[in-house]
Amino acid sequence: MFQTISPVDNSVYVERRLATRTEIDKTLSTARQAHREWQALPLANRAALCSRMVDAFVAKKDAIAEEITWQMGRPTRYTPFEVLRFEERARHMISIAEHALSEVQVEPKTGFTRFIRREPLGVVLVLAPWNYPYLTAVNSIVPALMAGNTVILKHSQQTPLCAERMVEASVEAGFPEGVFQFLHATHEDIARMIGDDRVDFVAFTGSVAGGHAVQRAASERFIATGLELGGKDPAYVRADAHLAHAVENVVDGVYFNSGQSCCGVERVYVDSAIYDDFVDGFVELTKQYILDDPTYPETTLGPMVTTRAANFVRGQIAEAIQAGAKALIDERHFPKSQPDTPYLAPQVLVEVDHTMSLMTEESFGPVVGIMRVKDEAEAIRLMNDSQYGLTASIWTTDEEAAIRIGGQVETGTLFMNRCDYLDPALAWTGVKNSGRGCTLSVLGYEQLTRPKSFHLRTAI
């Protein structure tokens, strides 16, 4: 058995039994058997079933949103948007499947018919995290299914109901048995699954350490893995930025989901000319957040997922202050913030530098360091001074400058005047320790299929 402890009130919210080895074996065999029939189903039929799955899921949006809050702590005023974003991404990936999966035609050659077909891999194992439990999962699940793969979903033990809800929707939509299944399993059993010949691809979202564990488990086999790992995403605010817009959106990028976002803003570099005004505005807006029970409608900042996670951030803050950083938020302004609880006040630190872990190691919490920079070159150097590279944002009124700077920043996605957002029409990918592979957009189908060339000599 395992228990999901709610960060809302430290109660046991979910209790589930872990799958046995026999049940895992049956799940793998069923997925393998279902694959051939699912692959043979016309794409239009798969699209209709996936669309009905989305319909069934969205129909329960209120209950699903409430469950998200209780499982991982996001305020109820925000959780419904995860269902809406799930629908947006799912429907987009369904809508582009015909184009993304179409045969690749090559230049004509007399006496030959030549083309490249995209075929499904087989069984896709999706390992999903708790922080955006549906959005991280849908990125791989829907395109995998549309491409003709069968899917086994293992969700974080913090958000087990999310796996159950998605598979439940597929059953209501009329999916054939074995096409989409879930398992509650241990890390050891998942490692064994990755090493099993019946698994053909692993899509993992989580920590760098988790990514290494997936790679080790797959190392004896020639299968690919898609890895979305950590981030320490920077924002660079230029002197020509629209200040009020930059403050409002960077603050949101730092604190939304209590900072527990893969692409949340974790470090900010501001041109000296506007640094003081930016920091003043940032602090003033931060003080307007309401840290409280996330089930209250007025709450804008909920607890972190666990006390351990909150204490890690507390440790980063204390270490930075000891090294010379200055904290600008008085924690007493947020009375719900208490030691050794998941409730943590938002914090802004200045006089920081890259000798501090706060500026180099993933925080995944409601804290940010803000540094003054003298010019563009210094900003680029500091933005690239990281083991991560998921997203970066530039705040400016000069699009050409954003493109020029973006070309020099080591990142998977470059934003201008926005942050912490995934556009399903664009490739979602990272560099360095932020992972490898790609989800979303037409390119997201590539890692879930294999090319098969047809070389037909028609004139003999």
Image: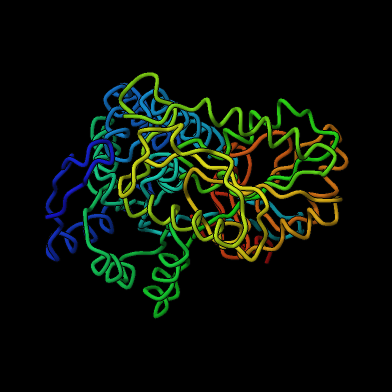
Decide if residue 34 is in sight here: yes
Residue visible at 12% across and 62% down? 20
Colour scheme of the picture: rainbow
Relative depth, front residue between 113 and 329: 329
Left or right: 386 with respect to 416?
Answer: left
Residue visible at 87% across and 42% down? 401
Q: Quadrant of the N terminus?
A: bottom left
Position of residue 195 measured from the top left corner of the image (x, y, whole percent): 32, 73
Left or right: 142 with respect to 37?
Answer: right
Relative depth, front residue between 458 and 343: 343
The extreme bottom residue here reads 220
Q: Quadrant of the C terminus?
A: bottom right
When asked about the image quadrant of residue 222, the answer is bottom left
Position of residue 135 measured from the top left corner of the image (x, y, whole percent): 44, 40
Position of residue 92 measured from the top left corner of the image (x, y, whole percent): 53, 33
The extreme top residue here reads 297
When asked about the image quadrant of residue 30, the answer is bottom left
Relative depth, front residue between 212 and 274: 274
Decide if residue 451 is in sight here: no
Picture mark count: 0
User: Please, is residue 294 above or below residue 213 in the view?
Assistant: above
Left or right: 302 with respect to 117?
Answer: left
Position of residue 457 measured from the top left corner of the image (x, y, whole percent): 65, 64
User: Please, is residue 261 above or below residue 384 in the view?
Assistant: above
Residue visible at 80% across and 56% down? 408
Relative depth, front residue between 376 and 128: 376
Residue visible at 72% across and 60% down? 384
